[in-house]
Every structure is written in structure tokens, then in C-alpha cells.
Amino acid sequence: MWFQLLFQVIAVLLMILFTRQSNGLNYRFIAEDDEFFAECDKAPSNALNFHGMADLSQITFARNDGIIAISGNATATWPIKPGDRIEGKGVMFWYDRGIWHPTQFSMTVHDCCAVMYDKPQYWYKYWTKHIINSEEIKDQCFNPGTKMLHEPFELDIIMPFTGLPLNGRYKVVTTLRAFDKSNVQRDTSVCLQAIGEFERLN
Ligand SMILES: *[C@@H]1O[C@H](CO)[C@@H](O)[C@H](O)[C@H]1NC(C)=O
């Protein structure tokens, strides 16, 4: 009897250990910039920044305990054409002794417009979910003039990571490029950079 019980206890402990490890650790990203995105360190000369890709004069950013609260409207100003394909790429870098090193974390989205309001996506959870006129503008993607009305929301980014614990400063560099129907790239691109630290939650 006692042996069976002991075995069960060990099995449960192993299960807890295993699920913890496979789920990884959860981290909250605390951005250094009050508007979340900053100018890219090494932006290509044709790249627009956050204020170049959208008119942000009707949007407000405010800090609450490190977390950025956002409300208001943003109007797309990136000069692309309706029907363009937007390709997005995000790469995470780690800062160590004066140098930004690329990490294994990167992501490429072939057609951002197709998945802009897709529920399982990170950007839906953290951004496009809060666009209250999404039904009206969901077919306009990020065409110039598209006005996105946001309900007030907090940009509280919580990410699970497996592997070595995250320490120090990180940056995520996001580049957006637009292509016409013949797959020719438009003259301007977008480069956004978010620098911050990951605060461990569990
Ligand atoms: C956002 O746009 C709506 C509709 O155009 C307008 O009523 C509202 O005043 C705007 N909000 C801000 C903060 O300008």
C-alpha cells in the first residue's frame, strides 16, 4: 500500500516538474520608451518611423506602474496602395557589453493584412482587438487614411519563454515592407524598435 502511494506521489511531482518546464517562464515586457516604439538604431534610409507610418496626434500614451496605457485614434499615413501585400519581420536582440546580439527569437509574417484581425495572433491580443471600428476598416488593412479608433487599453505584454532565463536589455526590431501586385517593393518601408527588459513573473 505505502509503496503504491509513494509511487503516486512521485508521479504527481514529476508531472508538475515536467509541465512547469515545458510551459517555460512567463515574463512581462517593460518598454523603455513611453510610446513603446523608438527610432530604429540602424534604420534603412527609406524607412519611416512610428510617427511616419501613422498620424498619432489623436492618441495618448500614459504610464501606469511601468505599463503603457493607450487610448484614442491613429490614422495610417504610410504611402502604400490598396491591395499591397505587407510583409512583417520581427527580430529580438540582446544587449551585452555594448553590443546588440541577435537571438533565436524571430518571426516573419508573409501577409500581414490577411491576419491583422486574426484572434490567435499576438498583435490581435495586444493591439487590434482594441480597435472598436474594426468591422468597418478590416478590409482596408493599413491603407493611407485608415483611421483606427481605440478603446482605452493597457499594453501589458506577457510572454512565455523556454530555455535560459532572460536578463538585461532586449530590443525587438520590427520592419514592414509593402509589395505591389507584381511583387515589386514600394519605395518606403517602416522600422520600429521596442527596447525594454523582461520582468519574470513565475
Ligand atoms: C477619435 O475619432 C472619433 C471619430 O472620428 C472622434 O469622435 C473622437 O473625438 C476622436 N478622439 C480623439 C481623442 O481625438
Image: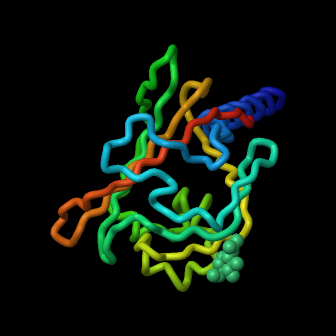
Please provide percent x and percent y for residue 137: 50, 81
Q: Quadrant of ligand 1?
A: bottom right
Chosen colour scheme? rainbow
Q: Where the N terminus falls, by quadrant?
A: top right
Q: Nearer the viewer, residue 96 or 39?
A: 39
- Left or right: 42 in relation to 8: left
- Left or right: 181 in relation to 39: left
Q: Residue at x 63, y 49 (%)?
A: 35
Please provide percent x and percent y for residue 22: 58, 37
Please provide percent x and percent y for residue 60: 69, 60
Seen in the picture, residue 128 relative to 168 is either above or below; the reply is below
Q: Nearer the viewer, residue 184 or 46?
A: 46
Residue projecting furthest to the top: 97
Seen in the picture, residue 9 relative to 91 is either above or below; the reply is above
Residue 26 is at least partly visible in this image = no
Q: Residue at x 54, y 59 (%)?
A: 123
Residue projecting furthest to the right: 2
Q: Residue at x 25, y 64 (%)?
A: 179
Residue projecting furthest to the front: 57
User: In the figure, residue 7 lies in which quadrant?
Assistant: top right
Q: How many marks?
A: 0
Q: Where the C terminus falls, by quadrant?
A: top right
Seen in the picture, residue 178 relative to 194 is either above or below; the reply is below
Please provide percent x and percent y for residue 192: 47, 47
- Left or right: 33 in relation to 92: right
User: In the figure, residue 109 lies in which quadrant?
Assistant: bottom left
Q: Residue at x 50, y 63 (%)?
A: 54
Residue 99 is at least partly visible in this image = yes
